[in-house]
Image (spheres, grey):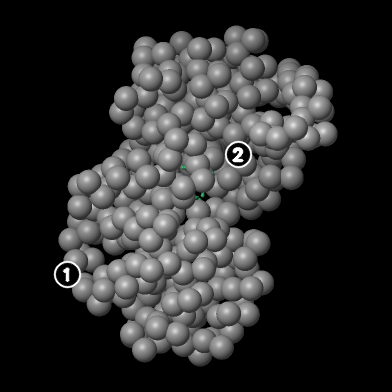
Amino acid sequence: MKFIISGGGTGGHIFPAVAIANEIRRRLPDAEILFVGANGRMEMTRVPEAGYTIVGLDITGLQRRLTPQNLMFPVRVFRSVRKAGKLIEQFRPDAVVGVGGYASAPVLLAATSRGIPSLIQEQNSYAGLVNKLLARRVSKICVAYEGMEKFFPADRIVLTGNPVRTEIAHGSRAEALKFFNLDPAKKTLLVVGGSLGARTLNLATAAALPRLPEAGVQLLWQTGKLYFPEAQRQAAPYATDNLQALEFIRRMDLAYAVADVVISRAGALSVSELCLTGKASILVPSPNVAEDHQTKNALALVSKGAAVLITDEHAASRLYDEALRLLADPERQQQLSQRVQELAHPDATTTIVDELFKLIAK
Ligand SMILES: CC(=O)N[C@H]1[C@@H](OP(=O)(O)OP(=O)(O)OC[C@H]2O[C@@H](n3ccc(=O)[nH]c3=O)[C@H](O)[C@@H]2O)O[C@H](CO)[C@@H](O)[C@@H]1O
């Protein structure tokens, strides 16, 4: 069997795609799986790291301002659709999966116009542009939130939850302590700003560094690429206190395993992973995303007493007071942990792959 999985741009699209690929491979070890992404984007390195081959298309988004890049946009779209068509004719997939992001558009267009079964996985409660445009052409749409009929034809929607890589919930604390060189006697705070890092979290964390050692707290601080050099300088004086700045965390399974409390943006996959790992968390939704969808992602937990919410605006003044309070309160951590686990969809990936295989069987 052969599958093409397309899309990417950020971790929130890439890692669900990897989770789906891993499940296909678990069931069919001989299956051929080809990823198609956008040249220059994160998938071009993260997908090979996960053990899969990826081909890049020269596709970008449309800029909101008038730029010379926009003039090239129709040409790029035309070339990408042509390249995607050629790939499909050479590779001859039995089914195609789109996870959102620019590269999934030409691939799904090319696949559906050739009658190849296709499935979309939408991570958010607010549908992405590519997925909205292609919804009428594909055979199945797997979603993580109720009420998605607003965006997609109701007869094609299946509520599955988001596919999370299985290893994420099985990290070992002992291995994590060694891997990150941490002190088993201290409490550990993990800060993750989504796959690209988050400026607000970085600024608040930098300001709070002097408060952590005296509270007996060690830190794994994922900063993203842009802020990393500055964060490294800021964290350097605290190296012996185990306050570490990290550009990107490859072993999120270990980071979650060792964390007592997580401060996180509320991207769809981060939220799904917090549910699955049962972590006590403080969510700071990004205000810079379509329709404020991260706040909706966060509220799905916060309204059930399963996470704490701090708005981006209040992060500078309140985030670390709240984090230190929570780190000092194991009972409250336990309560949040229990509640958040109830919101997990542990079968999401297997249900999505069941749906994919049903399409092929048809
Ligand atoms: C700014 C932006 O557009 N954010 C969107 C993006 O978020 P973003 O790309 O940040 O994605 P998510 O928060 O959904 O998921 C992040 C993923 O990256 C992984 N990870 C993260 C950091 C790290 O150092 N190592 C690592 O492996 C996490 O384990 C997780 O699997 O896609 C999400 C899913 O469509 C959306 O909900 C977000 O609103």
Would you identify the image quadrant in which residue 313 lies?
Answer: bottom left
Question: In the rendered view, does 279 fall on the left or right side of 77?
Answer: left
Q: Position of residue 129 (x, y in %)?
A: 55, 27
Hey, what amino acid is under mark 2? Gly
Mark 1 CB lies closer than 8 A to ligand 1: no
Amino acid on which the number 1 mark rests in the picture: Glu
How many numbered circles are shown?
2
Q: In this view, does 236 lie above or below 296?
A: below
At x 64% / y 17%, what residue is drawn?
109
Which residue is tagged 2?
A: 8
Mark 2 and mark 1 lie on one chain; the one further toward the N terminus is 2
Name the disc covering residue 331, or none.
1
Q: Position of residue 331 (x, y in %)?
A: 17, 69
CA–CA distance in space, label 2 to label 1:
39 Å
Q: Assess mark 2: CB under 8 A from ligand 1? A: no
Q: Is residue 260 at all visible to an observer of this figure?
A: no
Q: Is residue 78 visible?
A: yes
Residue at horizontal 63 percent and vertical 24 percent from the top: 105
Looking at the rendered structure, which numbered label has been put on residue 346? none
Left or right, residue 152 beside residue 49? left
Quarter holding the N terminus? Answer: top right
Which residue is more in the foreground, 53 or 202?
Answer: 202
Q: The residue tagged with tag 1: helix, strand or loop?
A: helix
Q: In this view, does 338 lie above or below 80?
A: below
Percent of width and height locating residue 187:
34, 78
User: For this rendering, which residue is in front, 338 or 227?
Assistant: 227
Query: Does 185 appear above or below 359?
Result: below
